[in-house]
Amino acid sequence: MEMKVLIVGAGLGGLRTAEALRSNGFSGEIVIVGDESHQPYNRPPLSKEALYSGLSHEDLKFRQRDSVADVSWVLGSAAEKLDLAEQKVILADGTSRAFDALVVSTGIRPRLLPIPGPTQGLFTLRTLNDAQSLQAAIGPGVNVVILGSGFIGCELAATATTLGANVHVVSLDIEPMVIPMGVDLGAAMRKRHETKGVTFHLGHTVEKFNGDHRIESVTLDSGEVITASVVIEAVGSVPNTQWLHDNGLHLDDGVLVDSNMRALGAQIPIYAVGDISNHPNKFYGDRTRRIEHWNMPTETGKRAGAALAAELAGRDLPADEFFALPAFWSDQYEFQLQSYGLPGAGASHRVASGALDGACIVEYFDEAGVLCGVIGIDTVKELLPYRTQFMAAKSWEPNR
Ligand SMILES: Cc1cc2nc3c(=O)[nH]c(=O)nc-3n(C[C@H](O)[C@H](O)[C@H](O)COP(=O)(O)OP(=O)(O)OC[C@H]3O[C@@H](n4cnc5c(N)ncnc54)[C@H](O)[C@@H]3O)c2cc1C
């Protein structure tokens, strides 16, 4: 009988897993369910150049390999409940999909703060539809408040400023992007934003949105009132695990999986990939992590596809430790940021070359003084030796 793999979440991780299933010899049925109406597309441009220059699915969609041309897509319908005992997933449209093996690739959604007041004019950014709504609302002279100063908040501040909006960023952090970057590089990035016209309100949050039906201003916890017709919440994320509860899976932070991306606590094959996968990685040492970087859906998808194809064929699962180097980039104005490793795990840092107000490389060290990550600004090529070094060591602490 033909085996059926159900992939829930039609994003990069889901697509890469389907491709890896095929390249590892799985010839059974693959069905991909997604709540968006689109086939998988590239999200990073949504806060950057696409928000500025144009947002079409045609331009953003991932090229699909011939090997997955026979995949069945069930789009525009969310998975509402996993029934593990019956090996089926119930969808929002009332139908259900049976499976022999399940891949969870439902990613994350923006976290929303419980702020009182009107919600017209309030935005988050995760999907193409979100970006299209935002694009229609932002323009020259529009007063925009961005809540949160992480990467997405800062990229949106840069793009909205470039589009001519008046941008205020409100954040409880002491500097923008402080968790991955540390105080010094965060402060240097703040200054670049300020030079472009962004106003920061650091160490503060929004207490209420003011206006009758639409947001007209926001009140900060300091009592300051900022005029705004557009508010964007970019204060972190929540893994989309709500449909998986009560099935014995470990869901404290995403889906806890083993080195093959196979869910812990699952008797039958259930795998989790991408932003939602809380996985071990030789690079992280003893602990598991969820990493919300673009390269991880591909890395975890490849591993899950290989392991699941082996499991369904009755072959041994890969026995080596999973290794993937976390890597991210960010574009803000004309500045290109690039990182390898886990700078956010650093206890100290030093400027290895250049100066913080220009092109530079900052190295990050763990508590034992071992290099654990690096961030460069406008030094994409100069950063490559660090990548080579991390890839060779497969760890930030080679002897661990
Ligand atoms: C605006 C933005 C900018 C980014 N910029 C960068 C960057 O510069 N550099 C970088 O390294 N990374 C960046 N990222 C992160 C990167 O895009 C993600 O790491 C990547 O998209 C994760 O892929 P995924 O497949 O795990 O999840 P996703 O791409 O989010 O796919 C998950 C899919 O599952 C769907 N889904 C959710 N719940 C359900 C359900 N119950 N039923 C059915 N479907 C469901 C979702 O709607 C979505 O379509 C950015 C992300 C965003 C949003």
Image (cartoon, helix red, strand yellow):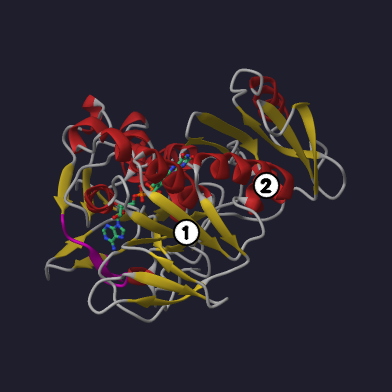
Q: Label 2 amino acid?
A: Ala
Q: Which residue is mark 2?
A: 187
Secondary structure beneath dot 1 equals loop
Query: How many residues crowd around disc 1 within 10 Å: few (fewer than 14), some, or many (20 or more)?
Result: many
Secondary structure beneath dot 2 equals helix
Choose mark 2 or mark 1, whichever is in front: 2
Left or right position of 335 against 88:
right
Left or right position of 184 against 26:
right
First in sequence: mark 2 vs mark 1: 2
Name which quarter of the figure residue 305 lies in: top left
In the image, residue 77 lies in the stretch drawn in magenta: yes
Residue occupying image coordinates x 52% and y 56%: 257
Whole-angstrom CA distance, mark 2 to mark 1, is 40 Å
Please say if the residues under marks 2 and 1 sit with CB atoms less than 8 Å apart.
no
In the image, residue 269 lies in the stretch drawn in magenta: no
Name which quarter of the figure residue 221 lies in: bottom right
Left or right position of 134 against 193:
left
Is ligand 1 closer than 8 angstroms to the Cβ of mark 1? no
Q: Label 1 amino acid?
A: Ala
**Residue 106 visible (yes or no):** no
Between 143 and 376, the residue placed more toward the observer is 143
Between 328 and 83, the residue placed more toward the observer is 328
Query: How many residues crowd around disc 2 within 10 Å: few (fewer than 14), some, or many (20 or more)?
Result: some
Q: Position of residue 298 (x, y in %)?
A: 43, 37
Name which quarter of the figure residue 17 lies in: top left
Q: Which residues are magenta?
A: 76-87
Q: Tell me the number on the disc at residue 263.
A: 1
Q: Position of residue 369 (x, y in %)?
A: 87, 42
Residue farthest to the top?
381
Residue occupying image coordinates x 43% and y 64%: 267
Q: Is residue 392 above or below residue 132?
A: above
Residue occupying image coordinates x 67% and y 47%: 187
